[in-house]
Amino acid sequence: MMAPTARSAIYDIAPYVGGASAIEGRDQVIRLASNENPLGAGTAAVDAYRAAGDSLFRYPDGGATALRQAIAEVHGLPADQIVCGAGSDELIALLVRAYAGPGDEVLYSEHGFLMYPITARTQGAVPVQAPERNLRSDVDALLAAVTPRTRLLFLANPNNPTGSYLSRDELEALARELPDEVLLVIDAAYAEYVEAADYSDGNELVDRHPNVVVTRTFSKIYGLAALRLGWAYAAPEVIDILNRVRGPFNVSAAAQIAGEAAVRDREHVARSIAHNSRWRTWFTEQLARLNLRAEPSVANFVIVRFADAAGAAEHLKQNGILVRQMAAYGLPDHLRITIGTEDDMRAVIDALSNYEQ
């Protein structure tokens, strides 16, 4: 007997593979492959999560009302234009499901997040890459790649894995010139880490352009990756569509409770930003002393070029350090390294000091 076959397009999908988390034979591993917050979740979020244990038999609030209100208050947004999801990955998938189908095109930048083309293929849509310039998304190239079949344009800002970003003016130009029928999805998963004065998370664009959506996550700065929690801000018409296609209880009660505490814990956010800024600067300076180049990054990671990236990754692994190889992103000569604790970053530099390229 044989199992039923799926749609033919599904077999063309290479499954997403997350960063490694374990090394056989080692109890202690330095995990710098998944851009997690090295400070973990804040005390307020952890306490709220523990308290949620008494109500696990209850269904969650299907509208995530308290969480959306907390997000709205912190970010100065209307709560009725926010929808929550099981990570921003779910929201990305829902947007593709709602707006693209067989034969449609989903546009993204050359070294953009792998889930964009993967999700497009699940719906039978065609993923289309626009070339980047110096590892930065190129507004002109993105606009030139738009065709009558384009339905969505995904832009990670800052971009994962390059760590680069488009300025407020560049985002505005992209939104202004993009056809109204194309949905611009700004994936701002790392927005909290950016300290550049000309950066925008894109929220203000939503108010002027009803075809703009901004997605955010609790997996990075808030340290809640295990709970799978994200949110989107969009025009009422888009929020209505997302609420029609999402599951009725798509965000667990524990995630909602911990997320509400996390988003209000501005002290933890500030501490995480300061830690990242300090050790990203230190790390890039130390790499330069080893004649290694880290590309400019505003996020909580850097990509570093090596003559033999696979060999460098294996050397780090032998020293108990896990980083992310970038061949799947079209960057076979680079490794992506998360900014970890002070001890983590010193361990990476010590290991690379003993590595001969």
Image (cartoon, grey):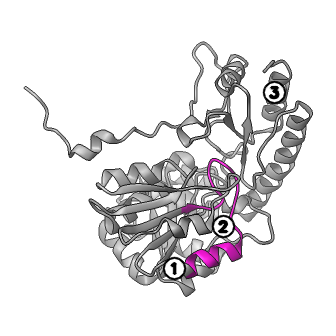
Pointer 1 residue? 79
Front tag of 3 and 1: 3
- Looking at the picture, which amino acid does disc 2 mark? Arg
- Looking at the picture, which amino acid does disc 3 mark? Ala
Pointer 3 residue? 347
| Horizontal relation, residue 223 to residue 340: left or right | left
- Looking at the picture, which amino acid does disc 1 mark? Ala
| Residue 207 percent coordinates (x, y) | 56, 85
Magenta-drawn segment = 155-176
Front tag of 2 and 1: 1
Quadrant the C terminus occupies:
top right
- The residue that appears at 52% across and 83% down in the rendered structure is 209
| Residue 17 percent coordinates (x, y) | 48, 36
Callout 1 environment at 10 Å: few (<14), some (14 to 19), or many (20+)?
Answer: some
- Extreme-bottom residue of the structure: 208
- Asked if 342 appears above or below 37 in the picture, the reply is above
| Residue 306 percent coordinates (x, y) | 74, 30
What's the CA distance linking mark 2 and mark 3? 33 Å
Pointer 2 residue? 264
